[in-house]
Image (cartoon, rainbow, N blue to C red):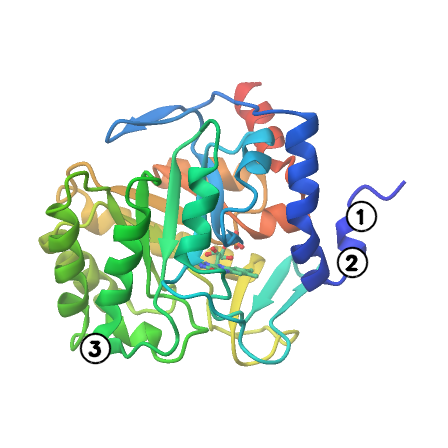
Amino acid sequence: MVRKPWLLLPSQLAHDVSPFFLKLHSWLRPSKSYSWKSLTWKGLKFENPLGIAGGVDKNGDSLAGWWSFGAGFVELGTITPQPQTPNPGKIMMRNIKELGLWNKMGFPNKGMQHCLKNLQALKSRHTPVFANIGKNRTTKNEDAHLDYIQVIDCLNNEVDAFVLNISSPNTKNLRDLFSKNYFFNFLNPIISHNKNLPNPKPLLIKLSPDIQQEELFNLLEISLQVGIDGWIVSNTTTDRNNLDWAPQQGGISGKHLAAISRNLLKDCVEYLKDKRKDQIIISCGGVLTPEDVYDRLNLGADLVQVYSALVFSGPNFFKSVAREALS
Ligand SMILES: Cc1cc2nc3c(=O)[nH]c(=O)nc-3n(C[C@H](O)[C@H](O)[C@H](O)COP(=O)(O)O)c2cc1C
């Protein structure tokens, strides 16, 4: 019997049919909760620190499915104000031998109103839910903060935290928002707006792995000053050193990203040492085995997220990690 039948399908098809199987699984087996290394942060209870990364469930169509597999938290999105189609041409690929994924999707999603309806239709909730949010590709960088504010206003009553995604390599010039010209002016109005809402939610920012140490420290410093609540380390990489199986454009996930995002995590933990109050660090990138999960936690990550592991090991990855953690 084939143990991972989805790996026989083309990656795009496997991605497209997965919501159906997740829904089926959630009907057959309702929510499963694995309790290991539980934590409470800003009143949010995480039964375990392992969650799904941005991009896995772009529209919040499969929440019950992720809960039925025992995820400790779920990040939806990237969600933009208006629905948008993917970038043209081939948008994803996997390399099973290299445990790698390539994508140049460009935030295809059904828009914030669709996600809102999905969240409002939930009958029960089993883990914290984060919304990863982005700008539409037609919105200029000068106006980008307005898109993020729109999505925050739309989903604020339905999610537990927001992740500001400006680190995707697949929306033209998006990463420029990290530059000195933009970063403060982008972040500050979003954080001020959120603070003035009746029910403000924690705001995290997802970092790019393709930055030098000096730039990283500068971004951490500014984000601390403006009052960010945490960082996700990291998005996909544009690095192609010793990698020949993927196109030049787009982002790489999985094994190739592991050392890069692990080093970035170490740098963040080291730099933020005494400067951190209750801000969290979420490690993401190349976490492919239960040992990788514990390694990132031991390095100082508060939470860990996976995408590639769900492709190469399947959704029972949550169970395998819990089993070893509890043994
Ligand atoms: C096909 C695909 C789509 C993705 N879409 C998003 C996205 O919409 N938003 C986002 O923040 N990250 C997105 N990512 C990046 C993942 O969230 C994660 O940062 C990256 O894959 C590294 O984790 P991994 O090595 O466990 O896969 C995507 C990754 C892949 C492979």
In space, the residues marked 3 and 1 are separated at their CA atoms by 45 Å
Disc 1 within 8 angstroms of ligand 1 (CB): no
Q: Secondary structure at mark 3?
A: helix
- Tell me whether circle 3 and circle 2 mark residues in contact (CB < 8 Å): no
In the image, is residue 235 above or below residue 298? below
Q: Residue at x 46, y 32 (%)?
A: 72
In space, the residues marked 1 and 2 are separated at their CA atoms by 7 Å
**x%, y% of residue 303?**
39, 38
Task: Sort mark 1 into few (<14), some (14-19) or many (20+) by Cα contacts within 10 Å.
Answer: few
Front position among marks 3 and 2: 3
Say if residue 97 shows up in the picture: no
Q: Residue at x 25, y 63 (%)?
A: 216
Q: Amino acid at mark 2?
A: Leu
Residue at label 3?
Answer: 142
Left or right: residue 50 compared with residue 186? right
- Quarter of the image for residue 202 reads top left
Q: Which mark is residue 9?
A: 2
Left or right: residue 164 compared with residue 125? left
Q: Amino acid at mark 3?
A: Glu
Q: Secondary structure at mark 1?
A: helix
Residue at label 1?
Answer: 5
Q: Residue at x 52, y 47 (%)?
A: 287
* Nearest the eye: 119 or 75: 119
Left or right: residue 211 compared with residue 121? left
**Image quarter (top left, top right, bottom left or bottom right) of the N terminus:** top right
Q: Which mark is residue 199?
A: none
Front position among marks 3 and 1: 3
* Nearest the eye: 83 or 244: 83
Left or right: residue 96 compared with residue 39? right
In the image, is residue 163 above or below residue 21? below
- Tell me whether circle 1 and circle 2 mark residues in contact (CB < 8 Å): yes
